[in-house]
Amino acid sequence: MTARTAVVTGAASPRGIGRATAILLAEQGWNVGILDIDATGGDALAAEITSTYGVQARAVAVDVSQEADVRTAIDELEAALPPLAGLANIAGVSSPVPYLELTSDEWHRVIDINLNGVHYVTHRVAESMVRHGYGRIVSVSSTSAQRGGGTYSKTPYSVAKAGVIGLTRALARELGPHNITVNAIAPGPIDTDIMGGPLTPERRAALIADLVVNRVGQPQDIATATAFLLSEPTAYITGQTLNVDGGLYMH
């Protein structure tokens, strides 16, 4: 691989998919640009990646739901790092609020981060990819988009994650002529804090009961799939949603 950078959103959480993905990509030789609202966590991860894996890494603190701030943050990454060739849209928030108790503020919070944030980041990174004639984009959706919930979060989360799948398919059509692939990953239950904190033994057992495999997913499971779809040999895979869910949703 020539010197290229993968942008990873939502990478600062110590138990998150974003962190596992950023580290795996660094292990594979990618330079890494980190976008996260947690400035301290992002900077610490960038320093760890640089010292451990010998690649370039830079973190910029940003709320992905703020379009102007996103563009400024990616401008900074583009100026500091090799060409932006990969994007992993992982930043997201959960929402277990029942629909009839849902407020307008909660609806907009979840949609703004989980769907609009993916659009804002992708739009700016895609501009850079088109200029270079190459790109790999992966966005994290959820089996909640396909099943209408059923893990932890409810309606606005499912709606936003369904929107990610639609955005993925539309962008695959538009960006394909520029040598850019666009795919989504739909995780099942993953043992991260977005599930409401560490899983109790009882809740873990309940989740496993719905799965084909006898365990709850780990961040590394999603990181591995993301790294695969960001790799150069996947040029003929685009517009797809890869379920990484232990057999929760078979379609």
Image (tube, rainbow, N blue to C red):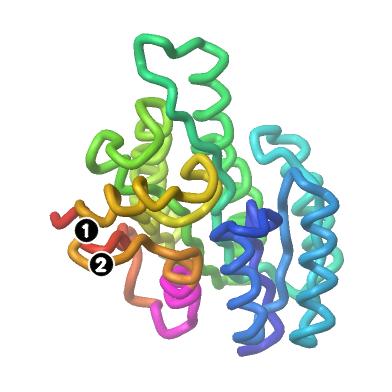
Q: Which one is nearer the viewer's eye here, 59 or 23? A: 23
Local SS, label 1? loop
Residues under labels 1 and 2: Cα distance?
7 Å
Whether residue 173 appears in magenta in the rendering, the answer is no
- Closest to the observer: 197 or 145? 197
- Residue drawn at x 61%, y 64% as measured from the top left: 129
Q: Nearer the viewer, residue 244 or 62?
A: 244
Task: Tell whether 119 sits left or right of 100.
Answer: right
Residue 179, percent from left and from top: 47, 71
Vertical arrangement, residue 84 with respect to residue 116, above or below: below
Q: Which mark is residue 211?
A: 1
Location of residue 16 (image quadrant): bottom right
| Image quarter hosting the C terminus | bottom left
- The image shows residue 61, relative to residue 157, as above or below, that is below
Amino acid type of the residue tagged 1 in the rendering:
Leu
> At 34% across and 39% down in the image, what residue appears?
162
Question: In the rendered structure, are the residues bearing label 1 and label 2 in contact, judged by CB atoms less than 8 Å apart?
Answer: yes
Say what amino acid the circle numbered 2 marks. Asn
Q: Residues within 10 Å of mark 2 (few under 14, many from 20)?
A: few
Region rendered in magenta: 224-234
Q: Please identify the quarter of the rendering in which residue 55 is found.
A: bottom right
Q: Measured from the top left, where is residue 19 in percent x and y?
A: 63, 64
* Circle number at residue 214: 2
**5 on left or right of 165:** right
